[in-house]
Image: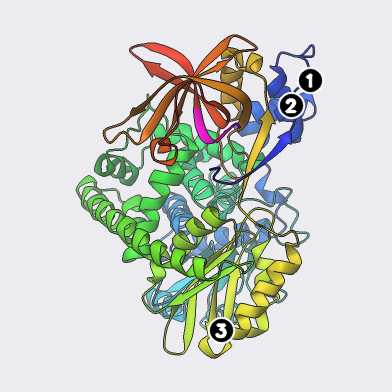
Amino acid sequence: MRVAKWKVKIDSVTPKTETAYHPVIEALLSDRGYLDTASIERFFRPDYDRDLHDPFLFKSMRKAVDRMKTALESGERIGIFGDYDADGVTSSVLLRTALEQLGFPVTVYIPHKEKEGHGVHKNALHAFQKEGVSVMFTVDCGMTNVSEVAEANRLGMDVIIIDHHHVPEIFPDAFAIINPRVLNCGYPFQELCGAGTTFKFIQALYQDLAPKRVGELKWLLDLAAVGTVADVMPLIGENRTIVTYGLIVLGKTRNIGLQEMYAAGKLKIDEWNKPDARMIGFQIGPRINAASRMEHGQIAHDLLASKDQAEASMLASQLEQLNNDRRKLSERISALVRAEAREQKDRRSIIAVHPDYTIGVVGLVAGTIAREIGKPVVVLRRYDECSTGSLRSIPGLNIIEVVERCGDLLEKFGGHAQAAGLTVKNENLPAFRERFDAMVDALLPEKMTEPELAIDVRIDPIHLTADLISQIQSFAPFGQGNPEPVFLLENMRIGDIRTVGSTGKHLKMTLISDERSKSFDAIGFSFGERFPDMKEGDRIDVVFTLEENVWNGRTSMQLKLIDLQLRA
């Protein structure tokens, strides 16, 4: 039984041309839009000095930097309001670190996810006023906070918005807005996250205020990379450069909080064990997010901003426990939402609402179920008057467009193409459910009978060489917008086959091509449970990624199975 409908992009590979690349690599490069020597060079070998754009291309950047020059000369206190998720926390720590190194007095406010929600809260404005803040930054938020920015202005604060989220029709009356998604903002790359956009502001600030120290900013790329990957931004263009260098810095980070996080989580990351983007996505990012999901994002901020090892060690241990608790809670609520999804199986979208859904994990659960069933999923916690929560989309559907078309039924909303948050009055829930489903149907007209598994290339066994797996590594870092290449091999015969792992749930096998007289090692994690009757001699089609397997000092190519189909 396949996990999804297979959809192959490239049906066949043309013979090798006179380039240095394997023919499969040439096909992949062409499919992903890298058609000439210059674009391939930038993709395969990102360069920090060449590939990062001038931050002053943002039309508002000069105004913001000049305001900070005045603030430094006058000794003004700076307030930073950061969102509570991994992107917002890393953005806040990035900006705080850079400003403090330049001599600014700084106050940071991270909102409570459940009690205050996304975006600027007036509690923060009054806290900043008491601290004497005269310049307030919003990082990874602020674009929809029209009334809150007006209140900050009334309290005597100049507001600088650093954000990357959806641009509303009505802008807040901020002193400056730095957002790559603003039309005609002047910046050539729209896909920066909050941390990436914050890093651009820091670059501009240092170029003006501390030009001899601009090189030090590379040490902050660890946090910029974490924000980029954790916020699931496409790893192309400038993001690819930020993450490529950020992964190097993560391996030898000077950030005491990250060092203690590695220790508490037993993460094997150091100068000799550089992490990949997957480790950010599945290990580092979730730990940072666990703070706001389970308690308060301030814990993660304080950890990453800490200069004291004892304090950082304590906070890292606390965060580790919160992350363990988050896993258990997510599993419990995911089971409840799966049951809701089965009841709504005939709908184009799933909307699950319940008073027991914990607000801290609804986005995580929505993302999990959306990936499993191939439909957009909304998970809301029901309160007395309103329900609030998160939604996650599927590839090919811009979810914020759907939400906007339901805007008159909502109290508030915000987000981007693949993820959003909203609040709706309970009395409007039935109407919202029907309109949302209708809009999904209108914007995604093809009927979805099952999730799709995207396959990059149908290949022949002759293509599977050491040269191919070596060149595939040049596509890393993998992630949103640059997935790890997925391949299809057909009509392979199973040779040796056995279960492995402590519980025997995984399958290890040899796949043989009779036509080409070639054989390959393959492993399918949890395939022992899915295919208990698989046996030697069966003929199968397999979908897989390629990896190097190191065993007893010997390195070999291994097919990491994603799905398979028994042939008749």
Q: Name which residue type carries label 3.
A: Leu
Residue 29 point in image, percent of width and height: 72, 29
Distance of mark 1 from mark 2, alpha carbons? 8 Å
Depth order, front residue of 58/516: 516
Q: Name which residue type carries label 1.
A: Thr
Q: Name which residue type carries label 2.
A: Ala
Q: Secondary structure at mark 1?
A: loop
Is residue 297 visible to the viewer in this orientation of the structure?
no
The answer to if 561 sits in the magenta stretch is: yes
Pick whichever of labels 2 and 3 is earlier in the sequence. Answer: 2
Asked if residue 8 is positioned above or below residue 76 in the image, the reply reads above
The answer to whether marks 1 and 2 mark residues whose Cβ atoms lie closer than 8 Å is yes
Q: Which residue is mark 1?
A: 14
> What residue is shown at x 61% (from left), y 74% (from top)?
144
Answer few, some or many: residues within 10 Å of disc 1's Cα (few below 14, many 20 plus, some between 14 and 19): few
Q: Which residue is mark 2?
A: 27
Q: Which residues are magenta?
A: 560-568
